[in-house]
Image: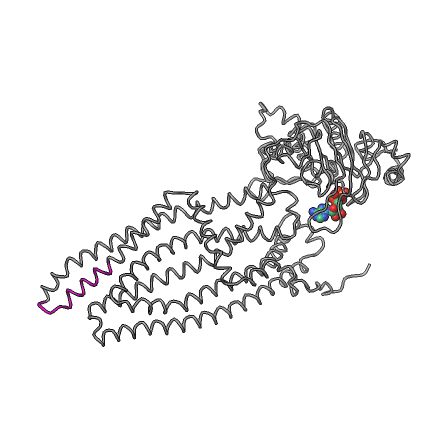
Amino acid sequence: MTKPRAGARRAEPLAELSAPSWFGHADEVIGASLGKLLRSLPAAMAMVGRTAWRADRRAVLLGFGAQVVSGLVTALGLLAVTGVLTSLFVAGPTPDRLSAAAPSLAVLAAAYALRGVADTAVSAATMRLRPKVRHQVERDLAEAISRIDLVTFDEPDFHDDLARSRHGGMDAVDTATLQAVAVVGGLVSLASTAATAALLHPLLLPVLLLSVVPETWATVRTARLEYEFVATMIETRRRRSLITDLLAYKESAAEVRVFGAQPFLLDQHDRHSRVMERAQIELGAKETRVALAGRALSGLGITLAYVTLGWLLYTGATPLAVAGAALLAIRTVRASLTQVVLAANRLFEKSLYISDLLAFFARARRRTPEVTGRSAPVDPEVVSLRGVSFTYPGASRSALADIDLTIRRGEVVALVGENGSGKSTLAKVLAGLYQPTAGAVCWDGVDLSTVDRGSVADNVAAVMQEPTRWPLTARYAVTLGRPDRPDPGDRYLDQVARDSGADAVVDTLSDGWDSLLTTRFRNGHDLSGGQWQRLSVARALYRDAPILICDEPTAALDARAEAAVYESLRTLQSGRTVVLITHRLASVRHADRIVVMHHGRVLQVGTHTELMASNPHYADLYNLQADSYRDDPAGESALGGQTVA
Ligand SMILES: Nc1ncnc2c1ncn2[C@@H]1O[C@H](COP(=O)(O)OP(=O)(O)OP(=O)(O)O)[C@@H](O)[C@H]1O
């Protein structure tokens, strides 16, 4: 055995990081015109508005009403200031001038007080609205995902789109709610103050607006740069977090250590980080240049505004008191404009993410099976496949090709064949989880593509090849397929636990059925692979469905548990359709029919005896396994104590 040289484990560079062929969506974004991006704003705003309205109408009305009040009293305050200054600047004794200014001063004080109340009401409404809007969108997203066709999860760009929507999109909705309120408030205040400024002198307004245009350009440009960065980096970020997950999760922690994979993973982590670092530094430099240009031009604009005011005073076109109020107006208009520009900028930036979210919702709708209102036959007598083919999204070869098969109620049909021959895919197509790309799956003659998926699923229970390790209590992990089943005294639960061997698992748990099955929380438990499999068999039995799919149901079970499972499958068999997938051919000898699969096609269908006599492929596979047991001096198979051959 050769000893690995120190430092020999150098990972190859990740070629795809320098050749960004998978930046597909980001390229579209980067290539989009500013106009196109700006057009995303109304749709995003409408989405936030609709969601806010659904989430809490009263808060929306209170928030916007208070904004209007706040804007109006700001203008009123400005007019009061003009009144105060006019009274103070006239000739005469100071006490007289002060008394003349008193009414305007009172209006000013009232305006400030009212504005304080209105602004507080706006904050209160916003604070109420923000979490509600976020939760509403999170709920909408979770619901949309839950309805998506299973095959969509195999589409290459689905997970990128989902990640962008879940992370960028959610935060965007949250921020957008806040900014939408700020934009409206700023606009109301701007409109009323600008109208007042225009009243003081019409020239002031265009000059003021001119001073804000460069800043607007700079902020919009910066927002776009940042979005481009996030969009181009999303896959790198996801890949990097995948590596962190491998290091962080218990499921992979042991293999990482056994194979000494830490240096490799850390190296991959660094490579991804370096790509992101370079892009981020480049982004920073671009943003600095844009901000500099914006500020320089904006400074010129402000200078121009003050020069204009000075010129108006110098030529006597404006009295001193009005010029004083105009100075205040300039400050207020600029403050309002800055508020609007900043908030609109953030909104604009967020609207790009919200359009991702909207695109995801649209994709989810397209990928959600249509609700037809028609139901699949309950407890079908005949399940038939006619010319069924199936190709996974993006795959170059079909996983199933031209399959014809009929299964009757009460039959146990075993699917056998080499790895990758299409057994699991066929089982999922049979169960209506995948729609065939050609041909049809019919239950009692009803094409499953014409009925609601929920009604199909209602008839199916499955023991999956890699059962989900549900991080719930043991009770929920078994009963979640029929949570509403009345089961006084847990009689049925205990029965399926005995049939699957799950009773022995639950007996070892400190809180029995109420034990939490994850060690990520306090007092949680973890189970062995075989113990999880026992629970998955119990779950399938508890669901008590007419069609039972068992995909390698006993692969992780010890001999005794395996024998118990097959015994209970035999009991269950009557009145049900059982599809059994296993590589242990001794276990399929007693199946009513055995379907031999090869490269996605059905080679032959028959009983064990028929196939041994006529199908050399099956006979070879069987004898290969049988031979390994014949070498066993005890002559006993480990498969549930059944003697092979
Ligand atoms: N999600 C997927 N995306 C693309 N191809 C897939 C996907 N799942 C399976 N395949 C391919 O489809 C073919 C059939 O796979 P399937 O899982 O049905 O085989 P199997 O007979 O159940 O294999 P095994 O005995 O290893 O469980 C294989 O070539 C496999 O690579």
Task: Return the x and y of residue 357 as percentages of the image width and height.
Answer: 53, 51
- Answer with the quarter of the image where residue 632 lies: top right
Above or below residue 530? Residue 269 is below
In the image, is 118 to the left or to the right of 552?
left
In the rendered image, which quarter contains the C terminus?
top right
Residue at far front of view? 202
Above or below, 340 against 600 in this view is: below
In the foreground, 464 or 630: 464
Q: Position of residue 93 (x, y in %)?
A: 8, 67
Report the side of 328 relative to 452 (left or right). Answer: left
Q: Which residues are magenta?
A: 77-93
Residue at horizontal 51 percent and vertical 43 percent from the top: 139
Image position of 112 (left or right of 347): left
Residue at coordinates 70% horizontally, 47% vertically from top-left?
A: 392
Position of the N terminus, as image quadrant, is bottom right
Magenta-colored stretch includes residue 80: yes
